[in-house]
Amino acid sequence: MDGNGRWATKRFLPRVAGHAKGVDAVRSIVEASAERGIEFLTLFAFSSENWRRPADEVSVLMRLFMTVLEREVGKMANNGIRLKIVGDMSRFDPKLQEMAAKAEAQTAGNSRLTLTVCANYGGRWDVMQAVSRMVKDKPGVSDYTEEELAPYLAMAYAPEPDLFIRTGGEQRISNFLLWQLAYSELYFTETFWPDFDAKALDVAIGSYQQRERRFGRTSAQVLDQKKAS
């Protein structure tokens, strides 16, 4: 969800105003995703590299995170949305950790849409923590498979993403779901996140629907499979 700060700067507003406006975009896209039958939506809210930002901006982001949990979780629970928060939560304030845990518990029984918020998350961190846990659980084993590692990844409960969307004009992954994005379709847009709405989401989905997903196969094989089904 890139471009909050630049959205604000273009309007001669403080960067934090862009983050607040970005929350409105989150609400809109969560609603639009649920309406379109999307079952899993994952948002990169705060990366492990974002601690490098100015301390006052990080502080505002933490307060904003807590405010969103206070105001939005009840609505999620009532609308069938399950909330998951993944990342290294140990660096966050204990109160924020407690609020996150309660939010997950409050929405755990929902199944309409699983909304994952990645906070203090990094793809490399994810792989390393998965490897560490796997090795600890399987002492004495020297050879491992991808299938053995997969259950230890932070988002083992979700399928691998079909579509990766990055707003704000940058065209890179930026340490997001490095393992899981191996075969995802990538979509980049100049639109800043606060302006990314349901219409923009439909454009991204339309782009995805024009792609041919081969997963290592040839176009002819994909066509034959479609005919067989």
Image (cartoon, rainbow, N blue to C red):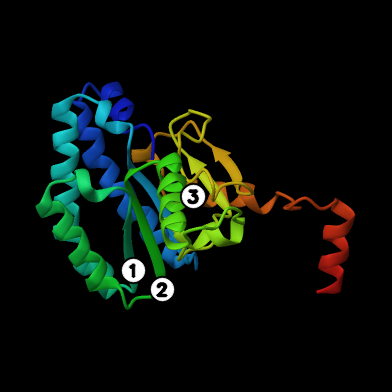
Q: Amino acid at mark 3?
A: Leu
Circle 2 residues within 10 Å: few <14, some 14–19, many ≥20? some
> How far across and down, in percent of the image, does residue 70 sit?
14, 59
Residue 92: image quadrant is: top left
Of the two numbered discs 1 and 3 in the rendering, the one whose residue sits closer to the viewer: 1
**Circle 1: element type:** strand
Separation (CA) of disc 1 from disc 3:
21 Å
Give whichever of discs 1 and 3 has the lower sequence position. 1
Circle 3 residues within 10 Å: few <14, some 14–19, many ≥20? some
Q: Amino acid at mark 2?
A: Arg
Position of 205 with respect to 74 (left or right) is right
Q: Where does label 3 land, which residue?
A: 201
Q: Where does label 1 land, which residue?
A: 82
Task: Name which residue lies at 66% across and 54% down.
Answer: 209
Separation (CA) of disc 1 from disc 2:
8 Å
Q: Where does label 2 land, which residue?
A: 112
Contact between marks 1 and 2 (CB within 8 A): the answer is yes
- Could one spot residue 1 in this view of the protein? yes
Name, please, the residue furthest toward the left.
95
Task: Name which residue lies at 53% across and 57% down.
Answer: 149
In the rendered view of the protein, which quadrant contains the C terminus? bottom right
Position of 229 with respect to 6 (left or right) is right
- Could one spot residue 153 in this view of the protein? no
Q: Nearer the viewer, residue 39 or 206?
A: 39
Q: Is residue 219 placed above or below 1 in the rendered structure?
A: below
Give whichever of discs 1 and 2 has the lower sequence position. 1
Q: Amino acid at mark 1?
A: Arg
Of the two numbered discs 2 and 3 in the rendering, the one whose residue sits closer to the viewer: 2
Position of 75 with respect to 37 (left or right) is left
Give whichever of discs 2 and 3 has the lower sequence position. 2
